[in-house]
Amino acid sequence: MLSKEEQIRQKMVETGWAYYHMKWLSEAEAKRENAWRKKTIKWLSSRINSSFYNNKLHTGPLSPGCVICGESNWSCAFLTHRCPAKCFFCLRSIVLWEPRQPYTDSISFGSCNDYAKYIELFDYKGVSISGGDALSDFNGLLKHISSVKKRLGDDVYLWAYTSGLELSRNKLKRLKNVGLNEIRFNIASNSYNTAPLKLAAEWIDTVTVEIPAIPEDFGRLTTLLPELSRIGVNHLNIHELQATATNYKALASRGYTFLH
């Protein structure tokens, strides 16, 4: 068994860019929080559902995109690194990266038709399109959706991620016409503005809010839930915060505790 000093040295090798800037979860804290989590899930067991070996806890049905994701039968295409938002939790640098070809799984595609052939070859049932903000390359987004739908039709479910900062009625109309099935909003990037959601609900069949679990925003989000339901949001996905070399200082400055 490694000594405490050796364990620290090992962690510094793994996360040398951040180790002393971050507050790490202790063994005692881990035991306490795991016990609380198990107790809470047990208390909620009659009110919630669990899917995919308890990796997804949910109170209502999952979106079709989430089901396909859970089945590992989807591809995520990254069109651009550009994004109008400046979220403190962003995994990528807010400095504008050099333009590059769309890619997925470290594979670059010279054209949207090449990507559609890739989806057909591996018989994927879902495609998510992200960035950056997928709408920051709107023409590219339209071309990719059109190419996949032209080749595979309704056999593939398509969703896109956006901050909503560059959304308009005209863009939604065009996305609807080319066959976008679902649009997912990071409303934490837009001060929890619900206007883009309301607009999207008029055009796109499935509207989802997908944000990280930001402790400071718990009360704000709770208050917002009735409005999200009223304006036609179908799903709320809350995922974990993730530390990278880009965002760890911003996370650490908020006093967050990190998992190894």
Image (cartoon, rainbow, N blue to C red):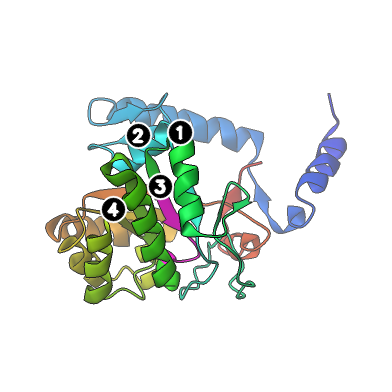
- Which mark is in front, 3 or 4? 3
Q: CA distance from mark 2 to mark 1?
A: 17 Å
> Does the magenta-highlighted stretch encompass residue 128?
yes
| Label 1: how many Cα within 10 Å (few below 14, some 14–19, many 20+) | few
The residue that disc 4 covers is 182
Which quarter shows the N terminus?
top right
- Which mark is in front, 2 or 4? 4
Q: Residue at x 32, y 68 (%)?
A: 192
Q: Is residue 199 visible?
A: yes
| Label 4: how many Cα within 10 Å (few below 14, some 14–19, many 20+) | many
| Label 2: how many Cα within 10 Å (few below 14, some 14–19, many 20+) | some
Whole-percent x and y of residue 230?
A: 12, 58
Q: Is residue 213 visible?
A: no
Which quarter shows the C terminus?
top right
**Region in magenta:** 127-134
Query: Secondary structure under badge 2?
Result: strand
Dot 4 amino acid type: Glu
- Which mark is in front, 2 or 3? 3
Q: CA distance from mark 2 to mark 3?
A: 22 Å
Residue 10 position (above or below residue 104): above
Residues at discs 2 and 3 in contact (Cβ within 8 Å): no
Seen from the viewer's position, the closer of residues 199 and 213 is 199
The residue that disc 2 covers is 57
Tell me the tag on residue 127. Answer: 3
